[in-house]
Amino acid sequence: MATTPDRRTDPRPPSERAGEATRADVGPRSFLRKLGPGLITGAADDDPSGIATYSQAGAAFGFGLLWTAIICLPLMVTVQLMCARIGLVSRSGLASALRDHYPRWLLWTACALLLVGNTVNIAADLGGMAAAAAMLSGVPAAPLVPVFAVLILALLVYASYERMTQIFKWMTLALFTYVIAAVLAHPHWLAVLAGTLIPHIALTQDYLLTFVAILGTTISPYLFFWQAAQTAEQNQHIAMRFPFRRRRALGREVRDARLDTWVGMLASEVIMYFIILTAGATLHQSGVTDVQTAAQAAAALRPAAGSLASWLFALGIVGTGLLGVPVLAGSAAYAVSEAAGWERGMDEKPHAAKEFYGVMAIAMLIGTLLALLRINAIKLLLWSAVANGVLAPPLIVIILFVCNNDTVMGKYRNGRTANVLGWIAAVLMTAAAIAMIVSFL
């Protein structure tokens, strides 16, 4: 039986060995191996808050906000790729990089912004999951909120996150029903094309609120901390599993992260686009311009699913919630634990990382209590996206400073394109948030 020669004893010239490595790097199996934190981040981005926001955008403005998917894609890829590079180069999360190289006030300001956004988002996602489950079961939504919270916390503590994501990300495939529903709704395709390519901007309160919500649920603070921490942790796991394997060249890791991030964000934006399109072709056309209940949001799927629309909608909401809420709680725990220098990791045992899991539990508890307030679940999902849209810009600026710091990033600091797109994201989100606040005043 043939064996692959050890590189240290292989007599072949380096050029031949490099060619073999290149051939091993192609093909479907190699492609799938390169997908990791970026893909999970993209899947978690379409959480219940995102589904509700995109549904409301399509219902209220028809195809008028389809263009946001086009502009959001390069901006979110740029921001997430900056976070991935921080994790790869520093071998730690974003909060660790801030702790090692920046003043404490900046570190804890970033953590505070994250915690506020995450707690509201957890509450909204738990409420949305409960509302979707209640629509099918007939059980009141309120008792289902703590049930989902306890289930997710138990899985976070006692199951490996890798196994969780392998199970729950399949549930999010229900979201692709929106693609089929969009086609079966027979939209006016010229109007769809116009909504996609020609920005329609209205300086009204409802439009600005929805626009900020779209930006906030797409370019979300919790994803910044999550991707950096998970990228660093994935590399640590690989090093521990294969202690005698040489560390891969950092340049190759950055290239793989770029592919991973593009695939994850592209999948996220495709779902976003078709949820807005489907809601515009169904809800908006039938006169439903303000989505108030889970049943109204589910009605967008009727062209494709008929009587199964409610089931598929609930499956998508619960599936994305079971994937997204752990990311929300986990990113908060990573940020605080890195800032304080505590033990951390999704696969650490509870007794070895008490503080890490304690932060998760507190975030889940506060989120549960907020979700139990008498607030419309769909509206809370929308407002959590708005909160993220307001809180994200200062964090993007912080990430830009880190990625341009020679001490932290070395030769992997930002290039001109990343800086331009990063600042466009920060300025656009800031301007939109200010305009929205002014419209309310």
Image (cartoon, helix red, strand yellow):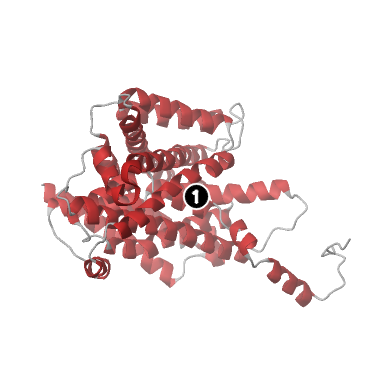
Where residue 354 appears, x then y in whole percent? 55, 28
In the displayed structure image, the side of residue 112 where residue 351 appears, left or right: right
Which image quadrant is residue 195 in? Answer: bottom left
Residue 148 image offset from top left, x and y in percent: 42, 29
In the picture of the structure, the residue carrying the numbered disc 1 is 40
Relative to 191, 317 lies left or right: right
Q: Considering the numbered disc 1 on the image, is that residue within a helix, a strand or a loop?
A: helix
Residue 103 in sight here:
no
Residue projecting furthest to the front? 307
Q: Is residue 205 visible?
A: yes
- Residue furthest to the top in view is 143
Image label count: 1
Q: Residue at x 24, y 62 (%)?
A: 187
Q: Is residue 387 left or right of residue 43?
A: left
Is 387 or 66 nearer to us in this picture?
66
Name the foreground residue: 139 vs 259.
139
- The quarter in which the N terminus is drawn is bottom right
Please report the residue visible at 31 percent of the width from the left and 53 percent of the height from the top: 275
> In the image, residue 110 lies at what x, y percent?
39, 45
The answer to which image quadrant residue 146 occupies is top left
Which residue occupies the foreground of this view, 249 or 109?
249
